[in-house]
Image: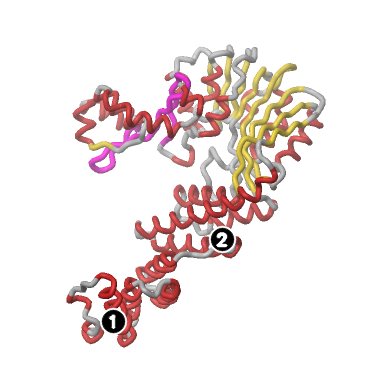
Amino acid sequence: MLLDQMCYDIVTQNVTMMSIKSLPKKTKLFIQLFYLGKRLHVVNVKNTLGCKILDNLLKLNLLIADGNNINSNYKITPFNNFYFLSGGSIFENSAYIGSDSFYLAKHLPFNFNATKVLDLCSGTGIQAILLARSAKKIIGVELSREVANIARFNVVLNNVENKVKILQGDLYEVVKNKKFDLVVSNPPFVPVPDTLPYVLWGKGGEDGLLIQKKIFTNINDYMTKNGIGLTVGMSLGDRRSPFILDLLNKTAKKEKLDIDILVYNRNHKWEQILRRSWDVLATFPNQKRNPFEEFDRIYNQADAEYTYCYLVRLRRGKGKVALINLFDKENSRKETEISEKTSLESLHSSFVNCFINRQYNKAISIYKNMERFSKVFGLKYRRDVFFILGVSYERLRRYKKAIIELRKAEMINPEEAQINFSLFKCYRNICQIEQADRELKKGVLKFKKYKQTVTKNYSPFFYGKRL
């Protein structure tokens, strides 16, 4: 319960991995599959559950067979003595539950005397189900049919079907002419270029405010006299504040609302660009456009340096907006430097992983973004970057480019024998036999110098004459 309150889902998973050893086999297996997301051998699953139960779970698409392994198509997350199914077979329309879900859940006004509650962009139904503890009637609205069905499953799973009803529709359209004491929402808010695909539960337009605008503009028509609106969101911003403040000021004056905005997190733009670009590459790998460039474009167009995460509370009043910012402006320069270092390290890690996984085209694409990033911040590369890039070109049989990059690596560290062996391969393959012999001879001499041993296969003139 303490870890739940801290909203550290990852921590609870690590604790679970250590604590399930003493549990019964069947309980342990279900936790491994549906909570920890582990892949288990089909024989172990059959022996524990039996063939009939396994076949039924596969038919229901709750489990997936992958060769000799079984893994879950969904995940069950425990939170405050409730259980929430998330995930789905179609990743674009899957039911999402994450840190923003937990943050909003942590700040729900359970002591507020709310009879009727509206949960917009309900997703897994987590907010609606948690509010069933205090409210009498809750309506959850979700656009995706698949996700709405998952939310309905969660309603039944947690025995709150007498209080919670999940409707499929677009925001207020399915609850016209109704008023609520409390309106909560966790809408799609990730700033995403219109030119790129993105998961439905995250795509919030190029400024992140596409869905938030629709919610704030009409919220007054659906709140009772003493009603409250509560939403979590994200938007672009500069060093001073998030750009959503302009929207909130206009909404407050027009609708006569008092609005409080609590900024609880802020990330440098490059951290978000890297993270969201990996999301696009992982989910939609066959992209013609470069995600890094597209994300960078929307930040540059808006003249934004950060993305801000915030909690917004609305109620009827005099049209005032109060900003509570948890970040000191004087520390912004230090944060930026840390973000730049973190971002380049993240790029480098992905670059190496792509090479290890033999994704050479992808590794070269990542390098191009690293090169652009280094020019912006004046950062220098290590020898291994040029070496990996050179070998990637060599594996793709683009030998001339490979030679250029390997020469760069050689300039940084001329004592590396492996560079010469790689150059030997390039020259050999473009039939420059004399140069190939020279590079191989250099590699052998360096290899002898640092390793003291060498095999017969590294005879310097053998390969050239053989070709």
Q: Nearer the viewer, mark 2 or mark 1?
A: 1
Q: Position of residue 62 (x, y in %)?
A: 35, 31
In the image, residue 4 above or below residue 240: above
**First reached walking from the N terminus: tag 2 or tag 1:** 2
- In the rendered image, the quadrant that contains the N terminus is top left
Residue type (three-letter) at the residue carrying disc 2: Phe
Residue occupying image coordinates x 55% and y 28%:
122
Q: Examine the rendering and report whether any part of residue 178 can be seen.
A: yes
Residue drawn at point x = 26 percent, y = 25 percent: 53
| Lateral position of residue 168 relative to residue 351, left or right | right
Question: Residue 78's image quarter?
Answer: top left
In three-dimensional space, the C-alpha distance between marks 2 and 1, rounded to whole angstroms, equals 37 Å
Q: Is residue 277 magenta?
A: no
Q: Is residue 185 above or below residue 394?
A: above
Mark 1 surroundings within 10 Å by alpha-carbon count, few (fewer than 14), some (14 through 19), many (20 or more): many
Please state which amino acid type lies under the numbered disc 1. Answer: Lys
Residue ID for mark 1: 441
Residue 64, given in percent of the width and then of the height, sits at 31, 37
Circle 2 Cα neighbour tier, 10 Å, few/some/many (<14 / 14–19 / ≥20): some
Cβ–Cβ under 8 Å for marks 2 and 1: no
The magenta stretch spans which residues? 61-88
Q: Which residue, given by chain and number where applicable, does mark 2 sit on?
A: 373
Residue 39 in the image: state x and y as whole percent.
30, 38
Say which mark, if any, is on residue 420. Answer: none
